[in-house]
Image: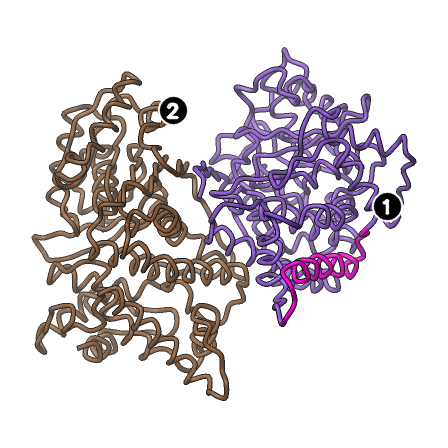
Chain colours: A brown, B purple
């Protein structure tokens, strides 16, 4: 087991009707002037924003709304939010929504606490982040895990780049999670979320050479739970118990618990981010479209036993005379079959993207920061190898 | 799934050599005058206290030692610590040791922050706890889980009572966990620790009637990991990877992660605490001595499917023509067999205790707060039923 730090200070308030506790939580965590960040009109129409605002009012907390966050949230929009937060004198940023709203809130918190700096300079760590405003979330979409994670991702439209930043300042003070709030999500969004949740665990799981039995048990259990409950919420998002499993798995998948003693890889995310930045495709779908090719490119040699364990423990595939290679490949196939059953793409064509040679080269360079970074802790992948994976995924 | 709050703010610094980071962590968490609470001379002789003190010195932090914590830590000793903390003007209480040192540190923190109140009044919640000093731990014994839990237990010798208090103020600011520090533990202490870790998970697991698939996966995985690594550390406490699994499981077992959506029971702990208070027996051993009888008293009816699932998922017992009852009983037997293999008692006689009728009556009343409290969320147990379980355990 490798040395690690595990720090998950977010207070989780989970269950039915918990959004009415939002005001009390904001007060407890020191907020008095709140910028309320959310996405489209559905949160307004459903009455959720109204219930959250009522709970703020009951605690004597002032707020202003900042709606209109888009999927793959934009830098320019976050910069607008920073100005709004500064004008309000906000001391607390509250997101209501999924990963896009929460990541935007995190960005606004960083920007508003450092008004002399350009947000993209903070984001790309040109300027070190030493302070931020407190952030919290009322979660409506189980997917990104941003409600408990130290991650946030923004797209800089001006230069066509999607980039993430990991920092303890990205940890929400609290996260209100009511699975009922996800009961009206469209099937495609649920499927993307389920894929993203699985991916956050798999992006840590396959790193070879380190014994982490307990971390493996959590990861495998999480994947089994998502595989068992994902189809249920896709058919019936009002299935409370199933949605509760998915929502809780979404947080546990990305709060670092699934990497303790092993660390993380996140190379599939790099490939997906490049696709989302260029084609504005949904994050979960971008991951599903390349994962199979990524896995087939890497499953052999020192990583083989990890892919075998995955097939056995997650999918219940036994050897029955099959070689390790065959078992590993059967696990990869089962995963793609599952993605397909959710309506997720397992190729770039299915994702609706057909990059030519030039576009492939750009994607590969983008995923590897201009070819300067080697991806994966399984086997170093440069721009050339990434290009090959994209090509396999066509 | 039931509504729940999950709050684990403790920053875990896990791995080899991490005790040298203690000073930096204390400083980061605002400490400048530290009361250093520890047990016997082994932490001094091993050089651990010296390394921790050096790390404090390097950060310019003042400290005073307060050694001599005993197993089943005593109220009177904690009260002495409160006086010492007040005399020093301590703003941070740091435990070096296992559950006894950490629980004593928590008690001192509560007492020193509330010098006008009697510590036992705070402990028994006659006086509500509204403030405390920050506490942290350098863990040397994987067992109690106190390094991440909101629990602490003290024995009031004057009245022969062992009682616990759960409060967010019991959460350590940070926990330094280096499995190397446990490499010199005696076998009996390791066995008690392994038992305690399993018990913290089992005390949450058997509550029937609530779907919690992810929580089940964590609980079952944790038990399998402890069962697989426990015998390894018993034979060779220097097996770093095995001890790392046990140490990490110890924290996860009792930081509430294994109860999310289900809650807890802790009735076996009530039976064990009564035994420890009366006979000063080791905590883990007291639990092992009664668990089998507790389980056989309760495994039927609505809890049967939980005991069947436990047998299947933790011990790999399959039906093979056996009835549910037989599978459940086989799981209970496997557990007792495992305890025996660790050298743990599975009866009161093996614990070295032979209470007469009068003593049994006292134990049963003590475990049920004078017969006023019904134990377990499986089936209500009053003093009479508890008496019957103790009798079965003879």
Mark 2 highlights which residue? A28
Which chain does the residue under circle 1 lie in? B
Whether the residues at callouts 2 and 1 have beta carbons within 8 Å, the answer is: no
Write the residue at 54% across / 42% down: B255
- Pick whichever, B18 or B381, lies toward us: B381
Which chain does the residue under circle 2 lie in? A
Residue A209 sits above or below residue A101 on the image: below
Report the predominant secondary structure element of the magenta stretch: helix
For the N terminus of chain B, the image quarter is: top left
Residue B270, image quadrant: top right
Let me know if marks 2 and 1 both belong to one chain: no
Query: Mark 2: few, some, or many residues within 10 Å (few <14, many ≥20)?
Result: few
Does B245 sit left or right of A34 as displayed? right
The stretch in magenta equals B321-346
Q: Position of residue B3 (x, y in %)?
A: 43, 37
Q: Position of residue A157 (x, y in %)?
A: 9, 53
Q: Residue B394 shows which numbered tag?
A: 1
User: In the rendered structure, does residue B47 fall within the stretch colored magenta?
Assistant: no
Residue A356, image quadrant: bottom left
Q: Secondary structure at mark 1?
A: loop
């Amino acid at each position: 087991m490798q040395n690690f730090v595990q720090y998950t200070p977010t207070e989780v308030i989970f269950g039915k009707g918990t959004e009415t506790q939002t005001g009390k939580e904001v007060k407890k965590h020191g907020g008095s002037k709140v910028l309320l960040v959310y996405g489209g009109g559905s949160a307004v129409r459903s009455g959720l924003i109204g219930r959250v605002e009522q709970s703020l009012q009951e605690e004597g907390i002032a707020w202003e709304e900042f709606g209109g966050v888009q999927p793959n949230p934009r830098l320019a929009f976050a910069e607008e939010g920073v100005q709004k937060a500064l004008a309000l004198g906000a001391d607390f940023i509250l997101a209501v929504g999924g990963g896009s709203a929460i990541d935007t809130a995190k960005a606004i918190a960083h920007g508003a606490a450092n008004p002399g700096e350009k947000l993209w300079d903070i984001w790309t760590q040109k300027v070190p982040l030493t302070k931020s405003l407190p952030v919290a979330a009322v979660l409506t979409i189980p997917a990104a895990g941003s409600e408990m994670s130290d991650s946030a991702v923004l797209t800089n439209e001006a230069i066509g780049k999607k980039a993430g930043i990991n920092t303890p300042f990205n940890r929400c003070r609290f996260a209100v999670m009511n699975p009922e709030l996800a009961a009206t999500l469209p099937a495609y969004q649920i499927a993307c979320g389920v894929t993203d949740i699985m991916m956050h665990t798999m992006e840590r799981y396959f790193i070879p050479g380190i014994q982490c039995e307990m971390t493996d048990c959590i990861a495998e259990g999480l994947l089994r739970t998502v595989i068992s409950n994902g189809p249920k919420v896709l058919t019936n998002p009002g299935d409370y118990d199933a949605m509760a499993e998915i929502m809780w798995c979404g947080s546990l998948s990305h709060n670092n618990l699934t990497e303790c003693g092993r660390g993380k890889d996140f190379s599939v995310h790099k490939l997906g981010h490049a696709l989302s930045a260029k084609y504005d495709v949904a994050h979960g779908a971008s991951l599903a479209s390349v994962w199979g090719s990524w896995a087939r490119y890497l499953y052999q040699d020192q990583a083989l036993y990890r892919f075998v364990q995955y097939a056995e423990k997650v999918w219940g595939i036994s050897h029955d005379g099959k070689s390790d290679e065959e078992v590993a490949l059967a696990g990869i196939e089962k995963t793609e079959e599952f993605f397909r059953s959710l309506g997720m793409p397992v190729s770039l064509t299915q994702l609706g993207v057909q990059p030519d040679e030039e576009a492939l080269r750009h994607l590969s360079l983008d995923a590897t920061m201009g070819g300067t970074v080697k991806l994966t802790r399984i086997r170093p992948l440069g721009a050339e190898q990434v290009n090959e994976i994209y090509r396999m995924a066509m």
